[in-house]
Image: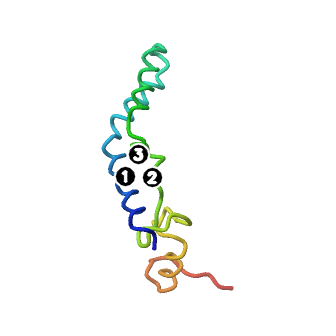
Amino acid sequence: MAKLSSVNKNERRKRMVKQYASKYAALKAKANDKTLDDGERLIARLKMAELPRNANRTRIRNRCQLTGRPRGNYRKFGLSRIMLRELGNKGLIPGLTKSSW
């Protein structure tokens, strides 16, 4: 089980990304617009830099929904490899079977 503070910190980051998503997207579009002059594009980049660091999507860490484990996650299930195997062996994940040969 991951530290609760790490899981909570990641949840705060997710909320902040959602809060600033529209502003971040507008500034990014303006900064990448080749039709604008360089001064306006630079101003947009500087305004992006003034946004909180945690407002950027790359700061979010994929974690297991059950344990909060930060590594070895399957995006499709939202689970770590360990929990995926445990739940798969118990038959709790529909369509998932353990292979044996």
Identity of the residue drawn at 50% across and 80% down:
88
Q: Position of residue 57 (x, y in %)?
A: 44, 46
Task: Between residue 98 and residue 42, name the one nearer to us.
Answer: 42
Q: Which mark is residue 54?
A: 3
Q: CA distance from mark 3 to mark 1?
A: 8 Å
User: Residue 97 placed where, x, y %?
Assistant: 54, 80
Mark 3 or 1 closer to N-term?
Answer: 1
Residue at image mark 2: 60
- Please tell me which residue is depicted at 45% across the width and 52% down the height of the picture: 60
Please indicate whether residue 43 sits to the left or right of residue 74 in the image.
left
Q: Which residue is mark 1?
A: 14
The answer to whether the residues at label 3 and label 1 have Cβ atoms under 8 Å apart is: no
Amino acid at dot 3: Asn
| Secondary structure state at the residue bearing disc 2 | loop
Q: Which image quarter is the N terminus in?
A: bottom left
**C-alpha separation, residue under disc 2 versus residue under disc 3:** 8 Å
